[in-house]
Each structure stands twice: as C-alpha cells, then as structure tokens.
Amino acid sequence: WLPKDLAMVKMISARESGCCPNRKGGDAVDKFCNITKVTEWNHRSDTGLMQLNGVHWLKSHKHYAGLFCKQYNICEQEPLLDAFTNLKMAKALFDVVGWSAWVKQS
C-alpha cells in the first residue's frame, strides 16, 4: 500500500470487520475481537480485516475466477484470517479493481 492509501485501508477495516482479523461475515465480536456469536449466515465467506469475499478465493466461482486461488494458491478461507495475508490479498484485489470492492461507486 502507498502511504496515501492507509487512511482508506484503516477506514475499510474498521467498517468491515471492526479491525478484528479473525472475523468472518456475520460474526459478533466483543471489544477484544473474541467471537461471541454468529448473527447472520448469508455472508460467511467474507473474511478477516478487509472482509474479503469468497468470490475472490473460491476457484470455482463464476466471477473473478478465484483470483486469490489461481494467482496466490489461497483457495480456502482460513489463510485469510491472518492479518498480513488478508491485507496482502486486499492489495492484490485493489490492484485489479481499485476501491470498488469495498466502496459503492456512484
């Protein structure tokens, strides 16, 4: 990431995961990032700090064709729960689509 991008990365991480690297979509967490329960089940593939979606790591997905899987051999959700790996893959996604993966374009 470039220094000019860091404020946006921080904002997205705070909004998407509460800055909790172990969070999956639908997880409720306490102030220490401990998962307390699952509140919804329809976004479980969203993963980690930047809530990277399964569309990017499932090699069989019809969109993006498993960008992380095919280019970085990350084909499962678990590696994306590591903060460094999550940010590295978020940067790879950013390099392809910019902020549009996280920010609705008007």
Image (cartoon, rainbow, N blue to C red):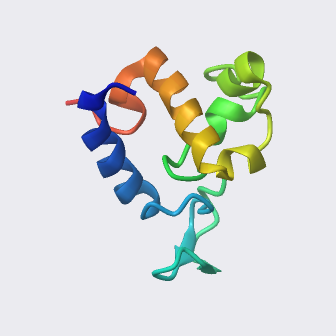
Q: Nearer the viewer, residue 50 or 45?
A: 50
- Residue 89 higher or lower than 67, as above or below: below
Q: Is residue 62 visible?
A: no
In x, y percent, where is residue 41? 64, 65
Direction from residue 98 to residue 20 in the image, left or right: right
Q: Nearer the viewer, residue 95 or 65?
A: 95
Give the residue at x 63% y 62%. 22
- The residue positioned farthest toward the left in the image shown: 106
Direction from residue 50 to residue 9 in the image, left or right: left
Residue 34's image quarter? Answer: bottom right
Residue 92's image quarter? Answer: top right
In x, y percent, where is residue 82? 66, 50
In x, y percent, where is residue 39? 57, 76
User: The N terminus appears in which quarter of the rendering?
Assistant: top left
- Residue 21 higher or lower than 73, as above or below: below
Give the residue at x 66% y 21%. 67
Direction from residue 32 to residue 59 in the image, left or right: right
User: The C terminus appears in which quarter of the rendering?
Assistant: top left
In x, y percent, where is residue 84? 59, 42
Give the residue at x 75% y 33%. 58
Residue 73's image quarter? Answer: top right
Direction from residue 69 to residue 21 in the image, left or right: left
Q: Is residue 104 visible?
A: yes
